Amino acid sequence: MTRIALVTGGSRGIGAAISKELKSKGYSVAATYAGNDEKAKAFTEETGIKTYKWNVGDYAASKEGIAQVEADLGPIDTVVANAGITRDAPFHRMTPEQWQEVIDTNLTGVFNTVHPIWPGMRERKFGRVIVISSINGQKGQFGQVNYAATKAGDLGIVKSLAQEGARAGITANAICPGYIATEMVMAIDESIRDKIIAGIPAGRLGEPEEIARCVAFLAGEDSGFINGSTISANGAQFFV
Ligand code: CAA
């Protein structure tokens, strides 16, 4: 049976690696993106994975987009809420706009992504919800009051969903990546990034594929008793 997976923010960074990993495991994959048409087109050409454009922070757009994916591919049984942004600034300089943008995408975006898919999972008695949180949701981070709040909130979402979905055959789990070699991490000032890497016992950034393999594991049909948990993949930078 072909499983249908939706990966938000699935055409770039960690999301692209997740989309490709699931495709290689036989899933029919839809990847969403927010803005960059050219990169999404190139991704589809390279991988054969269909992309869909909507803003995960917009409930109506998410619902409509998900309906389109289901019309094209079939009912979604695996959803990876991966789309996320940073608007880093020390708290005393963080603007209400920087706060709100991050909340809308990283936290409300998870609600908007999972909520329209959830009833179908309940009816079919199977579902896999995987939320990409962050090490910084676990430990906090200088300059990321907004981001850390959303990523900690994501953990609350999965622990609650896990309890609600368990009897319906649905699992909800989180992955907390550490610092991974993506555009998001490369955007940090080089001198700050070097200090961060020096604080990672593994002595390197993680690779997107290392997170993608965690997703594939949690998505597996034989992972049904793993529910409400968090995989920390951070090169020993932080222990919960
Ligand atoms: N702890 C304590 N003090 C710190 C600090 C830290 N981690 N980082 C900076 N400071 C101090 C600096 O030493 C400096 O002090 P002085 O003025 O006394 O020298 C002061 O705070 C100001 O620091 P900056 O010069 O860096 O301030 P800035 O305004 O230029 O930049 C910032 C602020 C944008 C938050 C910048 O510090 C930064 O980019 N930090 C990295 C934040 C980070 O790790 N983001 C993760 C992005 S990747 C991601 O989010 C993916 C994921 O899930 C892991």
Image (cartoon, rainbow, N blue to C red):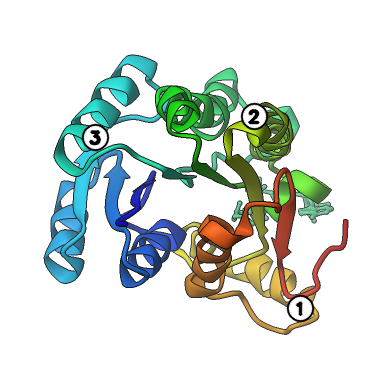
Point out the tag, 1 or 2, that comes first from the N-terminus. Answer: 2
Q: Position of residue 115 (x, y in %)?
A: 47, 23
Query: Is residue 142 visible to us here?
Result: no
Point out the tag, 3 or 2, that comes first from the N-terminus. Answer: 3
Residue 143, quarter of the rendered image = top right
Q: How busy is the neighbourhood of tag 3: few (under 14 within 10 Å), some, or many (20 plus)?
A: some
> In this figure, which residue is indicated by the disc labeled 2?
94
Q: Secondary structure at mark 1?
A: helix
Query: Closest to the observer: 96 or 6?
Result: 6
Q: How far apart are the alpha carbons under marks 1 and 2?
A: 27 Å
Q: What type is the residue that disc 3 sits on?
A: Glu
Which mark's residue is nearer the viewer, 1 or 2?
1
Q: Position of residue 215 (x, y in %)?
A: 53, 60
Query: Is residue 24 visible to us here?
Result: yes
Query: Closest to the observer: 21 or 201?
Result: 21
Q: What type is the residue that disc 2 sits on?
A: Met
- Above or below for 8 versus 23: above
- Above or below for 34 versus 192: above
Q: Residue at x 74, y 36 (%)?
A: 159
> In this figure, which residue is indicated by the disc labeled 3?
70
> In this figure, which residue is indicated by the disc labeled 1?
198
